[in-house]
């Protein structure tokens, strides 16, 4: 998938962080019961109660990064007394933010059914928005319903993004910036360390931690699976429409750092000024053009320090071979990933299609060949249907398949799903788009910006997906009484669960499309 395109998804009135949506769903129905208090290693925190679930918002898991820009995170300093944690912490600085931002952004949120020693499974969600945007406070990620339904502890979090998390300055600034390319991922390791050390006080089991994330969040999880510092901090992983096959190399990452500095009118020898400029100036530089293609890319760097190999190339990382994993996608990823910002793509003609499709494929394959094959496979498809199906298969789905194949070759326990149920929003034009599985897994179908809507079918789908993720978090196996047949993914049959109103396993779904794009190399966004 094209992780850099997450910023373009809006579907008109349904922006990901619409202020009205956040206000209407983020305010919980706080009960008139005593506010819960939990003890962390840094100090006590006071939260709130929402329909029987204790919530804590804005718990610091790391110290402010202001004054230590581009440096690895430090633990949060201790405090005295009881800290109020009923409001989300600020998000990382970013362009087009829909909420407060700050370099003091290392905060997490916890929802728990009980402050006891029940040792519940812990589900830690990593937000999407590529490596450039987003936060853990979106209404879609409210953990109260998931925590209540599954008797699990849910955690969401903020971490450094874009230049603040992935500006690789080691070749320009020397040892002082040796870790700068991956501090955003190092923040995630710090958050997981906090979970290990503190989650028992919230009724969670530090030895049963599941990472799950959508889009860029899934990519971050894939990257963590190859990072030695993250080993042992999580025990299951589920990625939803997000993968990281390869990372940036130092040459490409340095070229992007130079482009970023040029946008700020700084010369390479002025690299030290980046650490002291007002952070708003750095945000201005995020609009620079990428020296390779498109908008400036930020993401993990194979820096030979925290990341010494590509996440899933040339094979699956051995250090996470024992971690059970779900790898999922939606059938129509690009219908909103690309079509959400370009309505003309829903009214293409056959004459227009080749020129529009070629640059959108992200792999170097002849568009006419692709169109001819799709017309053979799906004669009822319109030109727009072909565009969205081919771009989904060529860029969004392809990386997921590579990871599935690598895990299968390794013999690692892995399950695949494809969300086939379609969104009813706007007359069904979006099909099963990117982000549709978020409200279905969290149970937030009533959120104003949920692509699922909140109808009977949406709630049924949510029960199916929520319960499968809860089962996976609890046992390492996603099968449930409602979804009893879900074999592991293997190279012989490539069995994938079709998530629809009646879920069923399907062998090698869209096999002809898979074979078509397997003819050409896959290049992860950000990799030269």
Image (spheres, rainbow, N blue to C red):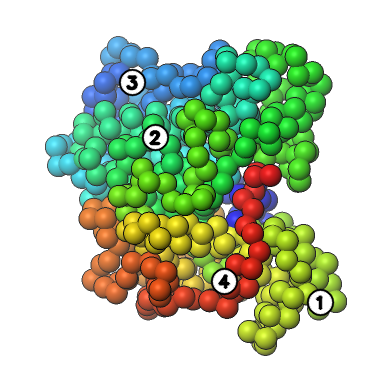
Q: What element does badge 2 sit on?
A: helix
Q: Of tags 4 and 3, which is closer to the observer?
A: 4
Tell me what residue is drawn at x 64 percent, y 84 percent: 378
C-alpha separation, residue under disc 4 versus residue under disc 3 = 52 Å
* Residue with the mark numbered 3: 83
Tell me what residue is drawn at x 71 percent, y 33 percent: 256
Q: Of tags 2 and 3, which is closer to the observer?
A: 2
* Residue with the mark numbered 1: 349
* Residue with the mark numbered 4: 514
**Tag 3 or tag 2, which sits nearer the N-term?**
3
Q: Is residue 380 left or right of residue 355?
A: left
* Residue 403: percent from left, percent from top: 47, 56
- Report crowding for label 4: few under 14, some 14 to 19, many 20 or more residues within 10 A (C-alpha): some
Q: Of tags 1 and 2, which is closer to the observer?
A: 2
Q: What element does badge 4 sit on?
A: helix
Contact, CB < 8 Å: mark 2 with mark 3?
A: no
């Amino acid at each position: 998938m094209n992780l850099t395109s997450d910023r373009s998804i809006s579907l008109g009135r349904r922006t990901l962080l619409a202020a009205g949506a956040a206000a209407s769903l983020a305010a919980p129905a706080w009960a008139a019961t005593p506010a819960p208090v939990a003890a962390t290693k840094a100090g006590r925190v006071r939260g709130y109660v929402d329909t029987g679930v204790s919530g804590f918002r804005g718990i610091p898991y790391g110290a402010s990064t202001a004054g230590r820009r581009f440096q690895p995170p430090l633990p949060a300093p201790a405090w005295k007394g009881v800290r109020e944690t009923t409001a989300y912490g600020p998000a990382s600085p970013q362009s087009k933010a829909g909420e407060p931002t700050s370099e003091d952004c290392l905060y997490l949120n916890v929802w728990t059914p009980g402050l006891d020693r029940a040792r519940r499974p812990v589900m830690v969600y990593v937000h999407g928005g590529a490596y450039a945007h987003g936060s853990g406070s979106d209404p879609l990620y409210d953990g109260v319903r998931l925590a209540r339904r599954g008797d699990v502890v849910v955690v969401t979090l903020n971490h450094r993004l874009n230049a603040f998390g992935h500006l690789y300055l080691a070749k320009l600034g020397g040892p002082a910036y040796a870790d700068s390319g991956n501090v955003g991922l190092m923040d995630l390791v710090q958050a997981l360390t906090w979970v290990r050390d503190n989650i028992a006080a919230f009724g969670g089991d530090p030895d049963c931690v599941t990472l799950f994330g959508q889009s860029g969040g899934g990519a971050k999880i894939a990257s963590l699976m190859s990072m030695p510092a993250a080993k042992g901090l999580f025990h299951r992983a589920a990625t939803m429409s997000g993968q990281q096959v390869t990372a940036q190399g130092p040459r490409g990452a340095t070229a992007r750092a130079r482009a970023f500095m040029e946008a700020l009118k700084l010369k390479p020898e002025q690299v030290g000024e980046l650490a002291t400029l007002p952070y708003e100036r750095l945000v201005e530089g995020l609009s620079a053009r990428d020296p390779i293609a498109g908008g400036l890319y930020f993401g993990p760097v194979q820096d030979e320090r925290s990341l010494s190999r590509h996440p899933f190339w040339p094979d699956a990382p051995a250090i996470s071979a024992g971690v059970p994993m779900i790898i999922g996608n939606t059938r129509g990823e690009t219908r909103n990933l690309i079509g959400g910002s370009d309505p003309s793509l829903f009214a293409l003609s056959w004459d227009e299609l080749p020129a529009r499709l070629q640059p959108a494929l992200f792999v170097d394959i002849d568009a006419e060949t692709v169109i001819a094959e799709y017309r053979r496979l799906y004669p009822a498809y319109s030109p727009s249907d072909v565009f969205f199906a081919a771009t989904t298969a060529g860029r969004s789905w392809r990386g997921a398949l590579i990871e599935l194949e690598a895990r299968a070759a390794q013999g690692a326990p892995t399950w695949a799903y494809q969300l086939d149920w379609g969104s009813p929003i706007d007359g069904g034009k979006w099909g099963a788009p990117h982000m549709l599985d978020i409200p279905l897994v969290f149970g937030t179908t009533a959120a104003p910006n949920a692509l699922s809507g909140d109808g009977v079918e949406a709630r049924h789908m949510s029960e199916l997906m929520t319960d499968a993720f809860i089962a996976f978090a609890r046992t390492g196996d996603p099968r449930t009484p409602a979804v009893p047949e879900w074999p592991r993914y293997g190279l012989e049959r490539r069995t994938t669960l079709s998530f629809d109103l009646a879920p069923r396993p399907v062998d090698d779904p869209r096999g002809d499309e898979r074979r078509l794009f397997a003819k050409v190399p896959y290049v992860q966004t950000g990799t030269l």
